[in-house]
Image (cartoon, rainbow, N blue to C red):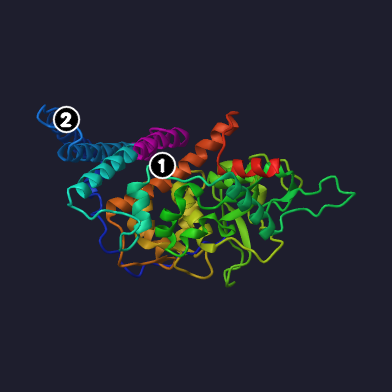
Amino acid sequence: MESLQIPDRSTSLPDRPTPVPDRFASLPHRNERRLELRASRQDLKRKLSDNALEWGSKRYMQLQIEDIELEREELVLERDDIGWEAEHKMMDDRKYRAARRTVNGRIVSLGDDLWQLKRGLRAINEKDGKVALLTPDSSGAFISTLLHLYKDPTRSRKRSSAMQSEMRRSTIEAYGATRPATDDSPEKNWLRCQVTGEFFPENSVKAAHIVPASLGTELAAYIFGAEKGARLFSVDNCLILHTDIERAFDNGNFVILPVDLAETPIRRWRVAIVNDSCRNQGLYMKSVNKLGDLDGKELAFQTPQRPAARFLYYHFVVTVLRCRQYKQPGWEGVWAALKTNRPWPTPGPYLRRSMLITLAEAIGVVDEAEIERLVESHTFRDEKRLAKDEEDEIARRVVESHEELVKAHERQDLGFYEDDEDDEEDDEEDDA
């Protein structure tokens, strides 16, 4: 794999939570903490079962929140146990990935329950005048993000079919992805996949999002910066990909990196395989027989349009963190490269620094010294930021969105097809 240089840390991060003590690194200490948590939860259960405690009251919600936070810590300890067993060769990598993914799913689900309680608690506090009423007319920073977190029950907003279809048409036009129609061409109006460079029938090609569209513009605005959130549903966040390539991209089997480290702005991009177990995955296309053949391949662009570097950087960071979390074959080499090499030619403030650190914690990579190698020159620091639990919830939704993409592809592999935004875009286009 080509050099992926990351600049060394030069500044420290303020206001971060206290790291997990070293004493929890060993199995006996984790077991000791687990017993403490069990006792605390039993005490909470007794308090919650008190007949004098009104269900749904502020005190009831506070106790439930405390109980869920303790349960979540129990799951984190269970996740640490899984890692410990893998390191001591008590389970193979395949079992480790399955076990880790199961626990992560439970943590994400529990986080959703926790946030629903915090939403309810805020509603009570607003009614009692303990906190300011949050409305679209409220003043202050990050109002749209806070409204989305606290007031939007759906958490995600699907666009109309007309809007989705227009997004697909705009992306195809901007990238010049359509094969010119000619009388003697049996493949007229096929679409070019920008990774393979080949043309394919329209129904096998997607206008694929780089950053999951399910995050919504409100959360994207906080992660990338207020003026960048709206670009989530623009051509900047899309690539034209064959469905098999989109699946590999969403699953984190490859990332897209700059070709020339001296180029600015970035115009040329290449594929870098980061999951060695998928190198022999069959593609059976004209130019490539397996996924590994794409390693180092430069993306094909027919127009000046390029995807936004900040969105590709986001995908790169999330993919590398997930590769490490799940110990994907080859992750050691990818992670080692990050310590000595820089993958991006022009450092830019792509992501909010505090969110990137919080995201790493949510994924389960908590070695802050290593994580900061990812953030030094590619993040922006803002004195104004959301509360820690609000950033935690955004990070949880990021993790959830990527896990849902993986699950959706797995369901399709099993023959269970369901509509998602990209599928609906394709269907609308086909009907037109």
Which image quadrant: the C terminus?
A: top right
- Up/down of 344 relative to 248, above or below: below
Q: Secondary structure at mark 1?
A: loop
Which image quadrant: the N terminus?
A: bottom right
Magenta segment, which residues? 82-109
Figure quadrant of residue 345: bottom right
* Tally of marks: 2
Farthest residue toward the front? 137
**Residue 154: image tag:** 1
Figure quadrant of residue 40: top left
Seen at 35% across and 52% down, the residue is 147
Seen at 18% across and 52% down, the residue is 129
Disc 2 crowd, CA 10 A, few/some/many (<14, 14-19, 20+): some
Measured as percent of width and height from the top left, residue 380 is found at 39, 67
- Up/down of 201 relative to 143, above or below: above
In this rendered view, identify the residue nearer to me: 301 or 201.
Answer: 201
Q: Amino acid at mark 2?
A: Lys
Most common secondary structure along the magenta stretch: helix
Figure quadrant of residue 285: top right
- Up/down of 379 relative to 252, above or below: below
Measured as percent of width and height from the top left, residue 419 is found at 57, 37
Q: Is residue 310 magenta?
A: no
Say left or right for 200 vs 7. right
Q: Which residue is mark 2?
A: 45
Q: Is residue 51 in sight in this rendering?
A: yes
Q: Amino acid at mark 1?
A: Thr
Of badges 1 and 2, the one in the foreground is 1
Say left or right for 25 vs 404. left
